[in-house]
Image (tube, coloured by chain):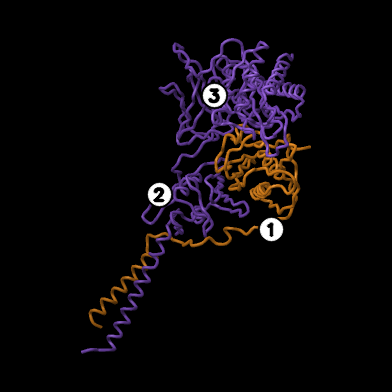
Chain colours: A purple, B orange
Amino acid sequence: MIDPAGTHMRKVLIASIIFLLGASLLPAQVDLHTVEFQYAGRGVLVPKLGTRIEVIPILALIGAGAEYSRAAGTYVVAYGEKRLQFTPGHKLVMVDGKLLDTMDAPVPSPGGVAASLDFIDRSLLGPLGFRLDPIPQGYRIVPGARFAEPVTVRAAAADFAATTTLVLTLDRAVIAEAESTEDGGIVVHFDDASPRLDPGTLLRSRRVRSLTSNGREILIETGADIGLLNWHNLDDPPRVILELGRVYPTPTPAPARVVERSGPPPIVIDPGHGGKDTGAVARTGLNERDLTMSVARYLSAELRARGHAVRLTREDGEGRALTDRTAIANRLEAKIFVSLHANSSTFSSVKGAETYYMSLDDQATDEAAAATAKLENEAGASSDGRSDLDLILWDLAQASALNESAGLAVAVQTRLNALLDLRDRGVKQAPFVVLTGATMPAILVEVGFLSNPTEASRLGSAEHQQALARAIATGIEAFLSEP
Amino acid sequence: MNRRVFWILAAAVVSLALLAWVLFGPGRHAITRQDMVEGDAIPTPTPAPEQRVMLLFPGSDGLLHPELRSVPLPAEVHEKVRTVVLEVLAGPTGNLQPVVPWTAELTAVFIDHEGTAFIDLTAPPKPLTGSHNELMLAYGLVDSILLNCPSLTSIQILFGGHEIPTLTGHLDFSRPLVLNKRFIAS
């Protein structure tokens, strides 16, 4: 028997059940576009945008305040005393005043800003003291950063007669230990912290060549036969004090590339640029690299003829790092360092010679010298036999080099103006890389503008180059003859 | 009600119970859905009052010359820095030259607790030359910002998201630069 009413009822019932079952599946479909984060017994479903996740709900979950400046395009996150800044589309994050590189950039999103899980874990939650632990539903935010927090290290070195004291000042207290490596280097290990060298660090040392941060270590490259004599930690501020000095006899000859001095202290002439770096180029094709080399040769001949020892920082066509140039002068214990350059301007009318020396009022020079002396004093440097007088003399020597640089710059610029009837663009101060760290009177001479057609033509002539060399040499001699 | 209808109804009841357990069952944290951030997370900025700013641009004498311009200048320091930099990047209105000789964009502004602002510009498409161009770029930006944002002490210029040692092989860009009036025409 067919019961039409019963069949109809059955169809309606089946349709209703299918509707209910379908409706029950909807949340699961939405969950494909969200991920759950849990923290302290609370959870939040956060929208996903491809591989990125909305950031603001996660920060809100842990109680961090996030303010967005639409005009500046910057998010400022505050959590307790922690301050963090980041910008959508940008791979840098500022954490408590320090810039950190990140692997990828957050992006603008419907909810404000979205980022990869790695960015959220490593660059947002990590600096705030949290980490993400995966759970079946998503992630749990737990206290304790997964990644070692950065520690900023400011280095300062003081050379004494037989030893060098290297002071590493840390911006927070962490466990750090120093040891010698098998290859003769020195390494400082940091426990649960990623050292980051302060970009303003300037080393003025004959015995320390370079510092490099690598993971949780700082690698220290020293001069030949220089090693770690001893080390210790100090507090307030946290520091690692390393005493460096000669640890091995010197049976092996120095490598050919190492610059050694024989004879009296030379005048070191640095022809600017070199190798593939041509520097400024005139319309005539004359370039700064070749011009400075040519003037340097004339200047070298002129000074030698006047009885001075002279060394150049590079040979024809050779490239050399800016910091190496000053290092050569320091190693040779040069009495003067002169870096030669030729200029360029977007205004073709700009012309004239200029002489620069290191900024006296700039942070790099004064701070480095003052900080080293201060740190040395705090480190109790006199406890191992050196007197406070050594420190004072060292500090005075640094300041004296800057003051003497000013005198040298004036002496050279005055001769350039007088002998060549150049337009006086004057003596100026600026933080040039090649002058940084020089421990003797050091100047940078811009002999003229290659962007000015008339001046470029003159700079291309051997007579003009010789005249420039004579003017600079006369200025140097006048400076050296000053009481 | 026959057996078939009974099983269908039973399946429906089980499904509903399962759904209820998934959404509201024990062992679950109170989950809130965050589809969109509420409007108050991104506050609408109030219009900034117009103020005169002094911007520095290179002149034909090789020095920086001031140009006065009235612009809406926000009080918040990030926004103020951004406003000044964007005005500098927009270039001079008179016979002066642009500070940045390529079409640069400002991509980020950070400010640390010591009053140092870090501004990130898109990198130059080709190498620049000449210490003069480097100095005009550096102090055209640095002095313009510091003269208009007195709460700041120094500026570090980043390029393409990176700290760089130098731009043309002369000036040290690896650290913040302070106000240097020696390149401003008197």
Select label 2 or label 3 by which is in front. Answer: 3
Which of these two is toward me, A261 or B29? Answer: A261
Residue sitting at 58 percent across and 58 percent down?
B42
Residue under numbered circle 3: A166
Crowd rating for badge 2 (residues with CA inside 10 Å; few <14, some 14–19, many 20+):
some
Residue under numbered circle 1: B47
Q: Is residue A414 visible?
A: yes
Q: CA distance from mark 3 to mark 1?
A: 52 Å
SS category of the residue bearing label 2: strand
**Quadrant in which residue A51 is drawn:** bottom left
Q: Please state the chain letter of the residue tagged with numbered disc 3 in the rendered image.
A: A
Q: Percent position (x, y) of residue A194? A: 48, 36
Q: Percent position (x, y) of residue A436? A: 62, 27
Q: Please state the chain letter of the residue tagged with numbered disc 1 in the rendered image.
A: B
Q: Is residue A378 above or below residue B126?
A: above
Q: Percent position (x, y) of residue A77? A: 56, 50
Q: Is residue A363 left or right of residue A227?
A: right
Q: Is residue B156 above or below residue A427?
A: below
Label 3 and label 1 in one chain: no
Quadrant holding the N terminus of chain A? bottom left
Q: Is residue B23 left or right of residue A380?
A: left
SS category of the residue bearing label 3: strand
SS category of the residue bearing label 1: loop
Residue under numbered circle 2: A133
**Quadrant in which residue A166 is drawn:** top right
Which of these two is toward me, A433 or B41? Answer: A433
Q: CA distance from mark 1 to mark 2?
A: 43 Å
Q: CA distance from mark 2 to mark 3?
A: 41 Å
Q: Percent position (x, y) of residue A136? A: 36, 55
